[in-house]
């Protein structure tokens, strides 16, 4: 069955369906993370003075800074992968997508060390209100990273390459949609980093 | 990205992506350095959120191509931003109201 408007833009929206779909999905994601950010603000307002500062000081700023740079790099390589497809250069696309997957793996490994270091010091989500919201926000973000990695792996492996050979424009549009999701995940981290680690 | 692009315009986009990458790196360093400034908590929050907003605008504008996107998407996002602020500020108004009693 042919998926409608996957290459040609719809007359009424001026968009391909997948792009409209991902933006509506991202709008719901803004509300999801927005709700949690809102929860953070009110928990912080209601917390005893200095409580959030005390628990935040137990987090590793250098690790989070490296993770920020890693995620920004992955965002650039993602957009470069899409640009490579636009230039009809499939081998460069594979290199850039590979870099993006590698960066997301590095991000998760650093996150793993961050979490285990907290657990080894008997710091859990139940330890404090700050830690509860910290693990909730970073855990949910981490799940988004994992979800993105699975989709990226699909587009990296040969199983998806038939579409590139049959319908290169359709394949390129799919990568653009994947990229929009990935940049959103990066965007969420851009706010999580200062809010959780630096304030 | 909303319209067809020639190879030259894609090359131009790549140049912009690399510039944005550099800017994001510099802004990340500035965010960390700003956290060491001797300012009040509210000033610190304001500064950090301003820098984060600039970084987010760069990612959304250039990597997500919002700068040249169709009005349909902009409309969806404006509606989302409106409800986002309603979600944030309605409880805040309620909180201030309860505090003043």
Image: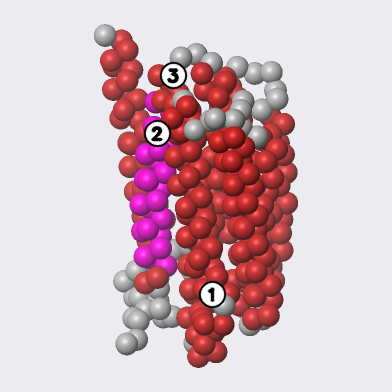
Front: mark 2 or 3: 3
- Relative placement, left or right, of B24 versus B96 is right
**Looking at the image, which is closer to me, A129 or B99?**
A129
In the rendered image of this protein, does residue A106 appear above or below residue A37? below
| Type of secondary structure dominating the magenta stretch | helix
Residue at left offset 65%, top offset 55%:
A106
Please, which chain is the residue tagged with disc 1 on?
A
Quadrant hosting residue A37: top left
Mark 1 on the same chain as mark 3: yes
Instruction: Residue under label 3, please give it.
Output: A47
The answer to whether B97 is drawn above or below residue B31 in the figure is above
Q: Secondary structure at mark 3?
A: loop
Q: Quadrant of residue A100?
A: bottom right
| Residue B34 image offset from top left, x and y in percent | 68, 29
Who's the residue at 50% across and 66% down the image? A150
Give the residue number, with chain letter if any, for mark 2: A38
Q: Which residue is mark 1?
A: A155
For numbered disc 1, what is the local secondary structure?
A: helix
User: Hey, which residue is sitting farthest bottom in the picture?
Assistant: A166
- SS for tag 2? helix
Residue A114 on image: x %, y %: 61, 41
- Mark carried by residue B14: none
Q: What stretch of residues is rendered in magenta?
A: A19-42
In depth, the one of B61 and B31 nearer the eye is B31
User: Which residue is at the front of the view, A98 or A108?
Assistant: A108
Mark 1 vs 3, N-terminal side: 3
What is the quadrant of the C terminus of chain B in the image?
A: top left
């Amino acid at each position: 069955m042919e998926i409608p408007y996957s290459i040609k833009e719809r007359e009424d929206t001026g968009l391909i369906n997948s792009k409209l779909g991902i933006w509506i999905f991202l709008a719901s994601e803004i509300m999801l993370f927005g709700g949690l950010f809102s929860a953070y603000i009110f928990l912080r307002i209601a917390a005893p003075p200095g409580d959030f500062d005390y628990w935040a000081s137990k987090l590793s700023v250098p690790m989070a800074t490296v993770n920020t740079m890693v995620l920004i790099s992955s965002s650039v390589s993602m957009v470069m992968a899409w640009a490579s497809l636009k230039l009809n250069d499939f081998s460069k696309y594979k290199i850039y997508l590979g870099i993006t997957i590698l960066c997301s793996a590095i991000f998760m490994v650093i996150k793993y060390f961050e979490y285990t270091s907290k657990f080894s010091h008997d710091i859990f989500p139940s330890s404090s209100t700050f830690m509860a919201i910290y693990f909730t926000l970073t855990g949910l973000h981490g799940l988004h990273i994992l979800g993105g990695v699975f989709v990226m792996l699909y587009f990296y492996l040969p199983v998806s390459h038939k579409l590139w050979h049959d319908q290169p424009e359709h394949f390129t549009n799919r990568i653009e949609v994947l990229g929009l999701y990935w940049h959103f995940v990066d965007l969420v981290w851009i706010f999580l980093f200062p809010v959780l680690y630096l304030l | 990205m909303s319209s067809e692009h020639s190879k030259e315009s894609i090359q131009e986009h790549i140049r912009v992506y690399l510039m944005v990458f550099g800017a994001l790196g510099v802004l990340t360093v500035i965010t960390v350095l700003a956290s060491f400034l001797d300012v009040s908590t509210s000033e610190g929050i304001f500064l950090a959120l301003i820098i984060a907003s600039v970084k987010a605008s760069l990612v959304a504008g250039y990597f997500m191509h919002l700068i040249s996107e169709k009005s349909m998407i902009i409309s969806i996002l404006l509606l989302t931003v409106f409800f986002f602020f309603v979600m944030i500020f309605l409880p805040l108004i309620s909180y201030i109201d309860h505090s003043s009693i």
